Amino acid sequence: RKTIFRSDWTMLARSARTALSTAAVIVSVLFAVTMFSSMRRTTAVLGRGVVRPRNVPRMVSVSPLRSHQNAGLSVSRHSKMNALTGGTSFGVKSAVVASAQKVDSQAKANELLDGIDTIIFDCDGVIWKGDTLIEGIPETLDYLREQGKKVYFVTNNARKSRAGYKKKFDDLGLQISPEEVLSSSFAAAAYLDQVNFKDSGKSVYVVGDVGIGEELDLLDIPWSGGPADMDKQIELKSGFALPHDENVGAVICGFDYGINYYKIQYAQLCINENPGCLFIATNLDALTHLTDAQEWAGNGAMVGALKGCTGKEPIVVGKPSPLLIDYLVGKFGLKKERILMVGDRLDTDIVFGNENGLKSCLTLTGVTSESKLLGPDNQIIPDVYVDSINAFRGA
């Protein structure tokens, strides 16, 4: 019996050793699969333009990645990804982090321009601040056209229609054609046109300025609100309920310097109580340039108010939504890989470029500083950046 027990213990020990060995193999396999999946997720993130793995500490000093070991410019996002993943172990001791290269010489500017046919500019913080033209812009736009580049202007500011922005360009002495400028007010109307909103027989309530209404007028879509409701007030008395139009089928929220409680309440009633009512935001910009003296609260503040009281997420039609770039590519036959998007905002302009297959360039004349761009908390990396767009002509 002792022999049998010893035999049982021997078999148990042998089974335990086998089980432990098997468990060790399983753990090793699971660890390898986990690491492989992690690297695949990191690669996917890098391919979308977010070029810093979340689990890798940022290096104290990082030099821009360069192709062919020269002082040349642009390394594509795929090249950045290959440089990051090829032969590099994502350990805790070291990591290679891609950073945007600064265009600070005519040679670098020439190399950048050689790779593009079309440049899309944001307006606020890039071309002007408020109603003040940024110095050197007319000369730069003339230079780019002389180099054979197509130039377009895409702004998230919905205060004006395309016609309104054409007039602003004219007033600032910048000669452009009407089809070269697109605004988020146009994008909002274009979206309604795409979904055949007019056929519904519904109307639109506008939280915003005249630009949205002017674009809706061009499509013969009825609307209310906007500047006409700037001075309207509610009555705080027992039994008072604010009436609203039950035929409103869409609320468009654009920048509104005359926003008030009446507009917020009216909009939320339409969104919450009218079945199927669309909630459309022209953009979610946190800050904007009303004057050249300081930053001002942007449309994100207006949209945030409506999100807060409706609990609903809006349909965003301005940057970084692909609606406007798809429109330009489709209408003018542009090649995305030959387009450079230039803007002053990481979360709209640069994401717009990176996510839609364009090259991207950040200018430091607007809301984003160089320290923010290169700081450890920034996850949005443009291909290049400039002090101002005058760098394109070496100025």
Image (cartoon, rainbow, N blue to C red):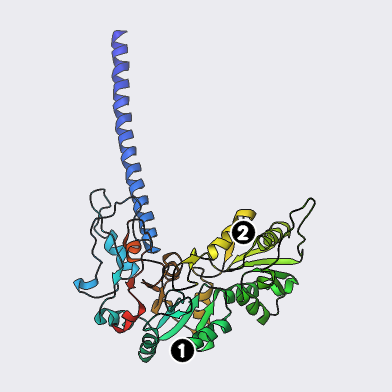
Residue 62 position in % (x across, y down): 24, 61
In the image shown, does 29 or 265 lie closer to the viewer? 265
Q: Reading the chain from its start, which is encountered first: label 2 or label 1?
A: 1
Above/below status of 298 relative to 72: above
Task: Name the residue rendered at 25%, 66% in the picture.
Answer: 64
User: Answer yes or no: do the residues labelled 2 and 1 have beta carbons within 8 Å?
Assistant: no
Quadrant of the image containing the C terminus: bottom left
Q: Residues within 10 Å of mark 1 (few under 14, many from 20)?
A: few
Task: Name the residue rendered at 24%, 70% in the picture.
Answer: 66
- Residue of label 1: 173
Q: Residues within 10 Å of mark 2 (few under 14, many from 20)?
A: many
- Residue of label 2: 306
Residue 139 position in % (x across, y down): 37, 88
- The amino acid type of the residue labelled 2 equals Leu
Which residue is situated farthest in the left direction here?
69
Res 329 seen here: yes
Q: Quadrant of residue 368?
A: bottom left
